[in-house]
Amino acid sequence: MNVLLIIAIILIGILPILYELRVKIFDFFNVKNLFIAYFLIILPISGYVSLATNDIDPIINLDTVVFNIYYTKAILATLVGLVCFQLGYYGTGNKSIKVPAFLKTTWISTNLSLLYWTFFIVGIGSFLLFLSVNGGLSNFLKNREYFRSEGVSGQGIYMYPSTQLLAFSAFLFFFNSIIIKNKVISFFRSSITIAKVFTFFIICITPSLVFGFRSLTGIFILQFLVIWNYGYKVIPFQKIIFILILLMACFSFYGIYREIPVNEKVSFNSIQKVVSEHPQIVYGILTRVKGTETVAAVIKRLETTKEYDLGYKSVYEALTVPIPHSIWKSKPIPSSVRFTTYFFGDQIAKTRGIKGKKNFGGIPSTVIGEAIWHFGWIGVVLVMFSLGVIFKKVYYTFKNNRNNFNVLFIYAIIFPNFVLFPEMLQGYVNGLILTTLFVGFIIVFLKLRIRFTYSESNSLAE
């Protein structure tokens, strides 16, 4: 029964994509497609791995045999959710949302150069300061895993500029070096120019790699590919698949490399030892999020307690997310923490031997689990159908305005948030709000007409 349901989910996910390929309207970077791909990985495919191996997360602690009925319900909820998403997407017209006049105005070249060089200098400076505070590069690499689990607290002042600001610097450099010059003055894009863009981008993502943030690095690469595909040259589907496979292989190897002791030489034997001791590293992309297990646990708990969250707390959280804790000391606990604490807090404390701690985080709710937590099964229908409608409007608004620098920049930056919604809806909605505010600042700055620098010759076409 479970296997048949999983097959049905996968077919419902990929058949519309196969149809689009057949009639030649498929666009890999339609945000809907990667959303579905990630949805299939973390829910039905991850669920199949759990059911086939009974390799259960000790925190979720829900045996696939004893509690099989809840796994069936979780898979059924996933099926219902994906059907509703497809109905919402394909049942919505192709009409786009009207782009505000503000987003149709021009950028100013002087401001653009000033902005990406400022981001670059601040980002590199923050990274060097971070290394200095943490005893240098060599010492940090020796203690990187401690940093990733505990040492990150209090160091956001260095990390954000070292990661996000540098990424924005690379994207704006890309716009300035290739997209804008080609559009405005028919700039011939030599191999040297392309090499400069790639080199600049690699420099900008290096701190994220040093930190060990594979997911964040992957997000930056995805954003870069979106800008490249729509702003410079369309990437053939075969090349995209090759790039993604190469990235997964590189990230898997990087994960293995991180597990090799610092004082041990990297060799075939050391790699083989790590893989034999931690085989999940190799197929971690399929099991990183135990989606079906989580949804099954949510259904089991709520059938007993009936304590639904009812959504209003999430709306309040999204509206107040820009207010920092340093200003609002009594700011409500994030839903991701409330979710983990409510459903898995006792088991986390027991498994890890933690006493006296009230709140926990770290278990992705999944979009299906979150919908059920708020409104039960009706929540799955409403949330997933609404997402389908939203995804259609977002994509077609971009598609019909893709030659607008502002629209392309916004779409590329918010793209990963939409793709990652299957993992945790509220968390990425919160991130989307913060990102939108920062992107808004960038766009406003790029349009400021500073008298002592502005002339008609440095205004850029949209």
Image (cartoon, grey):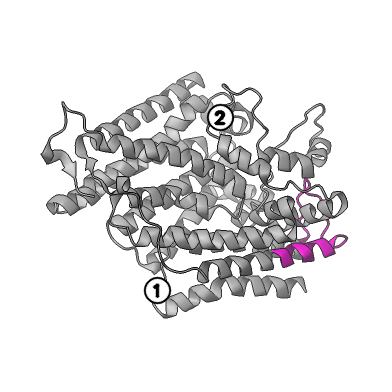
Residue that carries the numbered disc 1 in the rendered image: 25
Residue type (three-letter) at the residue carrying disc 2: Lys
Give the x, y percent position of residue 348: 78, 39
> Which label lies toward us, 1 or 2?
1
Q: Which mark is on residue 371?
A: none
For the question of whether residue 450 can be seen, the reply is yes
- Position of 338 with respect to 274 (left or right) is right
For the question of whether residue 34 can be seen, the reply is no
- Position of 72 with respect to 410 (left or right) is right
* Alpha carbon distance from label 1 to label 2: 49 Å
Rendered residue at 12%/35% (across/down)? 455
Rendered residue at 52%/71% (across/down)? 91
Q: Quadrant of residue 260?
A: top right
Say whether disc 1 or disc 2 marks the residue closer to the N-terminus.
Answer: 1
- Which contiguous range is marked in magenta? 53-77
- Position of 458 with respect to 90 (left or right) is left
- Vertical side of 429 occupied by 239: above or below: below
Q: Residue furthest bottom?
A: 22
- Position of 55 with respect to 160 (left or right) is right
Q: Nearer the viewer, residue 261 or 332?
A: 332
Q: Which mark is on residue 142?
A: 2
Give the x, y percent position of residue 204: 37, 38
